[in-house]
Image: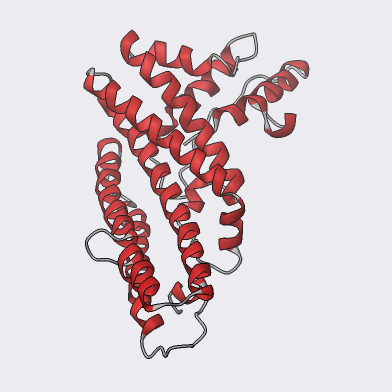
Amino acid sequence: FNNLRTLLVGPCGNFSYNGLLAAGKKYHTLGILNTGWTDSAQTIYRMSLPGLALGAVAGWQSAPVQSDTYFEEYARQMYPAAVAAEVAPALEELSSAEEIFSAALGGPTIQRLWTDPLEPGRVSRLEAHEAELRKARMLANSAQERLQRALRMNGNTVTLKSLLLGARMFDYLGMKNLYVVEWSKYFQQLKANPSPQLISLYLNIQISSQDHGMLSDLIDAITGLKEEYREAWLEESTSYRLGSALARWDAECEYWRAVRARVPEITRGRKQGDPFPSIDALRPKP
């Protein structure tokens, strides 16, 4: 999802659409190119429409684009009034979530969606940003509610479905990283008190229970999102490159299945008094 607030005002006052255009006008440029890039092979283009519209507006109008009213003005042009009243704040929430996730996770969200949260050094980063991750996930959940209400009003369902997919992808991004923070707390407690009861509760029930464990949540979420993603892709594009895009979703599912396979290996052959391993033991072996 486009972080339009950063596009408009720039990180720390640096490069921004408004700054770029002001410089262009100063030096009498002939125009700007408003482009979209899909190199990641994951882009759902309809999620980018607010950003593409921003480029068009910024290039045509004489005054700078106002970041505090842009989403409201965009939604009013695209949707009936009642629908726009839900979509505008949803776009604000999605933009804020993208901003928070990017800062907390260290990079563009389209890349961090696939990052292994158990890789060495990453767990400590997630723990340090737990509050921000929770805030971003709550924003994504609120955006989902607004977009679902907008869809029930018979808004522009094609664009709204794509935005809803983006909100659900943010929800998953928050869930996968917050779950790892929770698992880290379990392992810290087990290092202090590796009782059979706590091991069973944390590893066999909370993390890996087939019915309602956290790994089941992650597998259910990523496989369900994959089908929504496939549908969104085919609504706007041909099937070219779809296979390579979906391979990332399959790999994500298989990763969590491999994590689940690690759980019995951690406890197999364990004797009373043996020191309990760190959360690194959950990470699948290469």
| Colour convention | secondary structure
Q: Residue 59: name its quadrant.
A: top right
Q: For this rendering, which residue is in front, 149 or 16? A: 149
Residue 22 position within the rendered picture, expressed as x and y whole percent measured from the top left: 72, 18
Is any part of residue 88 visible from this angle? yes
Quadrant of res 57? top right
Task: Give the total number of marks visible in the rendering.
Answer: 0
Residue that extends furthest to the right in the rendered view of this protein: 27
In the visual, does 58 lie left or right of 224?
Answer: right
- Looking at the image, which is closer to me, 240 or 255? 255
In the figure, residue 142 lies in which quadrant? top left
Q: Which sits in the foreground, 78 or 282?
A: 282
When the figure is inspected, residue 284 is found, relative to residue 62, above or below; the finding is below
- Horizontally, is 168 left or right of 38 in the view? left
Q: Which of 109 and 24 is in front in this view?
A: 109
Residue 66, percent from left and from top: 60, 14
Q: Which residue is drawn at 59% across and 19% down?
A: 67
- Rendered position, 172 above or below 186: above
Residue 126: percent from the left, percent from the top? Answer: 56, 55
Residue 267: percent from the left, percent from the top?
38, 82
Q: Determine the residue positioned at 56% across, 44% down.
A: 131
Residue found 46% across the figure and 36% down from its top: 1
Q: Name the residue rendered at 27%, 19% in the picture.
A: 155
Q: Is residue 78 visible?
A: no
